[in-house]
Image (cartoon, rainbow, N blue to C red):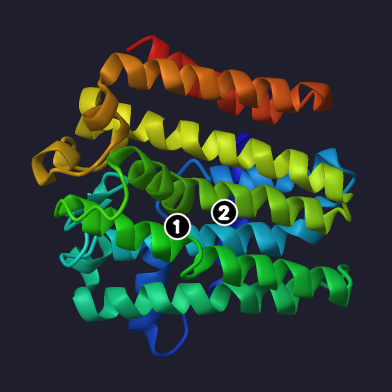
Amino acid sequence: MKNLINKINENLDKFLPVVYPEDIFKAMKYTLMLPGKRLRPIMCIETSRLLGGSEDDVMPSACAIEMLHVQSLIHDDLPCMDNDDFRRGKPSNHKVFGEANSVLAGDALLTMAPQIIIENSKNLSDTQIVKIIHEYTKFAGAYGLIAGQVVDIESEGGKLVKSAEKTLEFIHLNKTAVLFRLAVRIGAISANASEDELKTFDEFGKKFGLAFQIYDDIMDEISSFEELGKTIGKDKISGKLTYVSLYGLDNAKQKFNSLLDDCYDIIEKYNSLIFNEILDKLRNRINEA
């Protein structure tokens, strides 16, 4: 995984040179190049590899997914959203570049990502590229990531149109799981996967995304700033709807482990060292806490 992370970082750096006007590119690159797990691009590349695809062919799409993810982090930290001063152990984008530039940096990453796919996916067919761009725009927009963010904000103020249980599921599916689904779906499309293979990995992405959000909810309860690199306990202070706040810490851990069991089962036949390493690390961190 370390080698793969290094390759992803090299390509992110290559795809985003700092040119005039420098301020916007510096703001985009600041959060993009902060040290991170790069789980979404790794999962995109590994899915493609398992299904017979090429790492080089899927790399632009994998980097685009990371740009989309980072865009969501930049906007999520803004004062009008979660109002967090830190991200990955460093000052948040708006603390360094100001709110206006941070909004624009997020917008620029959102729109640059599909440009990276189109301009650099030389060996993918036009049909594959159209499918990938469609997946990107669908999952990034009002039917996906943005929908999850909106309901997350609404729930913080106690404005629940649905039950708390259904609202929480909607937030987790659309704010978190959606990008893991996008990653594995694009990886599958890049490898010309069958419809059945696409469905299998989509289910894996959904289950993993739900588990990862519960993991994040648990860590916000039990971890430290040094471990996560962001302000701890803000969810509880702001009255956010989380798995821990709704079901309690013990039930959250049980649900997390159950979802991880499902992930292991789905991916077992592919014998992926990388996916197993990701799952093992999450499980060990929670069960050792």
Disc 1 marks a residue whose amino acid type is Met
At x 33% / y 81%, what residue is drawn? 23
What percent of the width, then of the height, locates residue 78? 22, 65
At x 51% / y 46%, what residue is drawn? 177
Compared with residue 102, is residue 63 higher up or lower down, i.e. above or below? above
Q: Which mark is residue 113?
A: none
What percent of the width, then of the height, locates residue 19? 47, 85
Find numbered disc 2 in the image and state the secondary structure of the residue it sits on.
helix
**CA neighbours of label 1 inside 10 A, class few (<14), some (14 to 19), many (20+):** some
Q: Seen in the image, is 148 located left or right of residue 99?
A: right
Image quadrant assignment for residue 137: bottom right
At x 73% / y 79%, what residue is drawn? 119
What percent of the width, then of the height, locates residue 166? 38, 43
At x 30% / y 76%, what residue is drawn? 103
Disc 2 marks a residue whose amino acid type is Asn
Q: Which residue is mark 2?
A: 9
Find numbered disc 1 in the image and state the secondary structure of the residue it sits on.
loop
Q: Which residue is mark 1?
A: 33
Query: Marks 1 and 2: CB-CB under 8 Å?
Result: yes
Compared with residue 281, is residue 202 higher up or lower down, i.e. above or below? below
Image quadrant assignment for residue 204: top right
Image quadrant assignment for residue 4: top right
What percent of the width, then of the height, locates residue 238? 12, 46
Compared with residue 221, is residue 40 higher up or lower down, i.e. above or below? below
**CA neighbours of label 2 inside 10 A, class few (<14), some (14 to 19), many (20+):** some
